Image: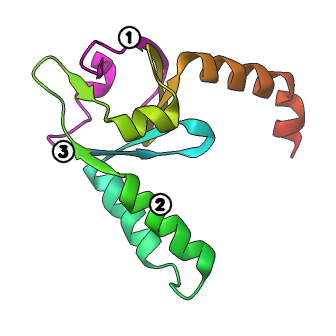
Amino acid sequence: MFLGEFIHKLDAKNRIMMPSEFRDELTDVFYITKGPEKSLLIYTEDEFIKQSQRLDAMINENKKNRAIKRLFFSSTVKTSLDKQGRILLNKNLRDYSEIDKEAMIIGNNKTIELWDSENWKAYIDEVEVNLSDIMDE
């Protein structure tokens, strides 16, 4: 289970340190893909397989389903931690997420999310103002 939020800087080679609390659960191979609200999602191998199976079960004759599957699989990168516990963010993922210098790394139960720190702050400011309404729905 991934919990908490951590802020880490992107280095000159576009690598970012994963929090030590998350490293043990990230096996040799894991997956990074585009997520909602300009976030990046990190799936463990087991969670990626589950997500892939859910997407494979979607009916291909539906235009929306085809688009979701294409976007998910075409933007996904299979990766691993380097010896220092860092991951490399490719240009496509950096551009999408707008992560330039500093990233917020958050645990979201079975996945990890990476956000540009300013985008995360703006998102949280908006959500916290409406938290009561969101919880009531």
x, y percentage for residue 80? 18, 37
x, y percentage for residue 17? 29, 17
- List the residue tagged with mark 1: 9
Screen quadrant of the N terminus: top left
In the image, taking residue 84 as reference, residue 112 lies left or right, namely right
Nearer to us of marks 1 and 3 is 1
Residue 84, relative to residue 76: is it above or below? Answer: above
x, y percentage for residue 51? 41, 61
Question: In this orientation, does residue 123 appear?
Answer: yes
**Quarter of the image where one finds residue 82:** top left
Crowd around label 2: few <14 · some 14–19 · many ≥20 (10 Å): few
Q: Residue at x 46, y 27 (%)?
A: 3
In the image, taking residue 76 as reference, residue 101 lies left or right, namely right
x, y percentage for residue 13? 24, 19
Pointer 2 or 1: first along the chain: 1
CB atoms at circles 1 and 3 under 8 Å apart?
Answer: no
- List the residue tagged with mark 2: 71
CB atoms at circles 3 and 2 under 8 Å apart?
Answer: no
Magenta stretch encompasses residue 16: yes
Task: Name the residue type under label 1.
Answer: Lys
